[in-house]
Image (cartoon, rainbow, N blue to C red):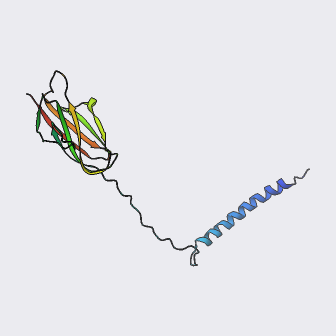
Amino acid sequence: MSMVSGPKFGFRTLMPICGIAMLAILPVLLIGCSVGGGSSSSPDATPQPTVAPTPTPVAQLGSVIWTTSLAPNGEPVEDIDAFPRDAVTIHAAVSVDTVQAGETLTATWALDGVAIDAIDSTVTIDEASEMGWVSFSLAWEGETLWPVGVLEVAITAGSGATTTGEIQIEST
């Protein structure tokens, strides 16, 4: 009969004993740490106020003003309720307040409730402004006239503001 000896045997024999000893000592150490009454070496935590981020202003869009001509600053020259089929250009102008540089405005068009996808357009604001005008324009070219119906536009800012307008295209 041979006897097993050497470091392997000693290690295998001691390992379970060390593990059991650690398991027996660990709860005592944890209980000693959690039972209070004594002084703590760390100061009491002082609650820190929560700092709310400053919200980015959202562009404010006015009502759509329909016009056939614009002033140099983009402001509508006149406000019309309908336009004739033989008008060359129609503008949908909107006042924009509290606009930031980089803000985008997109115009989506429809005629009698049917989307006109081919003429959607987007503009990007170059510099921040407290108040200004943005206009979207449609020009009719060719031998035929504008179709009779209701032209609609929805103008949406990238920051979430939306305004809509419609105008009657009248027969001439």
Q: What is the quadrant of the C terminus in the image?
A: top left
Q: Which residue appears farthest toward the left when viewing the image?
A: 172
Location of residue 92 in the rendering, given as x and y in whole percent from the top left corner:
20, 39
Q: Nearer the viewer, residue 141 or 162?
A: 141
Residue, x 26% and y 38% (percent of image)?
A: 107
- Front one among 68 and 21: 68
Q: Which quadrant of the structure image shows residue 133? A: top left
**In terms of image quadrants, where is residue 102?**
top left
Q: Is residue 6 left or right of residue 63?
A: right
Q: Is residue 18 left or right of residue 149?
A: right
Which x, y percent locates residue 36?
A: 57, 75
The furthest residue to the front: 72
Give left or right: position of 171 versus 73: left
In the image shown, does 34 or 9 lie closer to the viewer?
A: 34
Q: Position of residue 78 (x, y in %)?
A: 12, 41
Q: Which residue is located at x 15 percent, y 38 percent?
A: 67
